Image: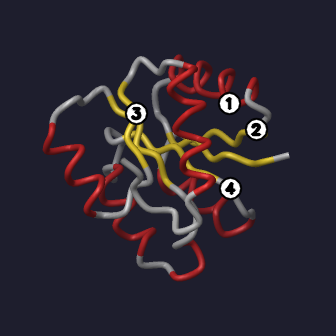
Amino acid sequence: MKKALVIEDNISDQIMTQYMLESLGFNCVICSEVDEALSFILKQKFDIIFLDLNLPKVTGFQFLLGFRYAPLNYQVPVVIVSSKNDSESLSVSKSIGACNYITKPINKNHLETVVQSCLINDRGIYNE
């Protein structure tokens, strides 16, 4: 079974994302903060990571930048999930190595397409 890490501080978004990913056959680990996520990343291997941009303490962009420079984690695709729907957020996500970008509320069919696209791309970087 594939494993997904969801880094999201909004409880209702956590529940919805987990429900959709589990229906796609994923085992999910949910974290509300980056520190918690990092402790899981050091202990477990994930097939894909879903990352909210607006997190307490550290933004999703800050996390992704640091994550991409950690050699052991470079290949893990990271999908940005955000309520922001602006070209700057999309552009920054792409430039720092996001596999893709999903706007909230998440559409299950779009989520499935993004997951398939990111898991096929073995480099774990942005797919258009």
Task: State the SS at label 2.
Answer: strand
Q: Residues within 10 Å of mark 2 (few under 14, many from 20)?
A: some
> Between marks 3 and 2, how big is the CA–CA gap?
18 Å
Q: Residues within 10 Å of mark 1 (few under 14, many from 20)?
A: many
> Between marks 3 and 4, how big is the CA–CA gap?
17 Å
> Between marks 3 and 1, how big is the CA–CA gap?
14 Å
Mark seen at residue 102: 3
| Mark closest to the chain's N terminus, 3 or 1 | 1
| Mark closest to the chain's N terminus, 3 or 2 | 2
Q: Are marks 2 and 4 in contact (CB under 8 Å)?
A: yes
Residue at image coords 49%, 78%: 70
Tell me which amino acid carries mark 4.
Answer: Asp
Tell me which amino acid carries mark 1.
Answer: Leu
Mark seen at residue 47: 4
Residue 115, quarter of the rendered image = top right
Tell me which amino acid carries mark 3.
Answer: Ile
Front residue (pair 73, 113):
113
Residue 102, quarter of the rendered image = top left
Q: Is residue 50 above or below residue 46?
A: above
Q: Could you tell me residue 32's position as x and y percent?
A: 52, 39
Q: Is residue 23 above or below residue 122?
A: above
Front residue (pair 20, 118):
118
